[in-house]
Image (cartoon, helix red, strand yellow):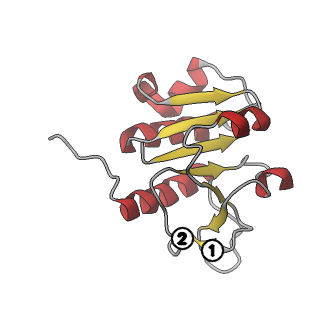
Amino acid sequence: MPIRIALYEPDIPQNTGTILRTAVCLGVGVDIIEPCGFVWDEKRMRRAGMDYLDVVDLRRYSSWKNYHENRPNVDGRLVLLTTRGSMSHMEFPFLPGDTLLLGRESAGVPDLVHDCVNARIFVPLTQGMRSLNVAVTGGIVLGEALRQIGGFPLRSS
């Protein structure tokens, strides 16, 4: 897979389900870095992820340490989507093997995680706006990353 998405301690099951569904539709794997801020169960995930969850390339990690030591695409860059980013997602040169890291909806990621990533990027917003929904942000940036590397899946019909 050319790109992966990693969710750092996600808080909201509906957002997680939406990201999983987006990932399946665009041919991208997802890594969940626990603990989650919700009980991981079929009902919560299915509400947003629907039947796509049966085919998602999903890997779960018990902690940031476990993920950092065992993550897939280990030779690829870890790219954090953050309001504290230094470059717009439209200016950032994505590469095959990159992993897009999304923080918790409530608090982003701690400085320890900020210090471990290869790049920090942001989605430009209208003046005075704080942030977008994490699933929306992930979809916007994933679309740009796949566009840049020519990684969009081909439609069969």
Residue that sits furthest to the top in the current view? 42
Q: Which residue in the rendered view is the most extreme toward the bottom?
A: 127
Q: Secondary structure at mark 2?
A: loop
Report crowding for label 1: few under 14, some 14 to 19, many 20 or more residues within 10 A (C-alpha).
some
Does residue 2 appear to the left or right of 99 in the view shown?
left
Question: Does 157 sit above or below residue 128?
Answer: above
Three-letter code, disc 1: Met
Question: Looking at the image, can residue 146 be seen?
Answer: yes
**Along the line of sight, the residue nearer the viewer: 131 or 143:** 143
- Looking at the image, is 22 positioned above or below residue 83? above
Is residue 95 shown above or below 104?
A: below
The image quarter in which residue 80 lies? bottom right
- The secondary structure type at the circle numbered 1 is strand
Q: Is residue 103 left or right of residue 57?
A: right
Residue 87 numbered mark, or none? 1
Task: Please give left or right for residue 76 compared with residue 10 in the image.
Answer: left
Rendering coords of residue 14 (x, y %): 59, 36
**What's the residue at 48%, 32% (across, down)?**
49
In the rendered image, residue 70, in percent from the top left (x then y), is placed at 66, 33
Which of the numbered marks, if any, corresponds to residue 103? none
Q: Position of residue 57 (x, y in %)?
A: 47, 30
Q: Which numbered dot is residue 92?
A: 2
Which comes before the other along the chain, label 2 or label 1?
1
User: Which amino acid lies under the numbered mark 2 shown in the image of this protein?
Assistant: Phe
Q: Are marks 2 and 1 in contact (CB under 8 Å)?
A: yes
At 35% from the left and 53% from the top, the residue drawn is 151
Q: Is residue 11 something one can see in this rendering?
A: no
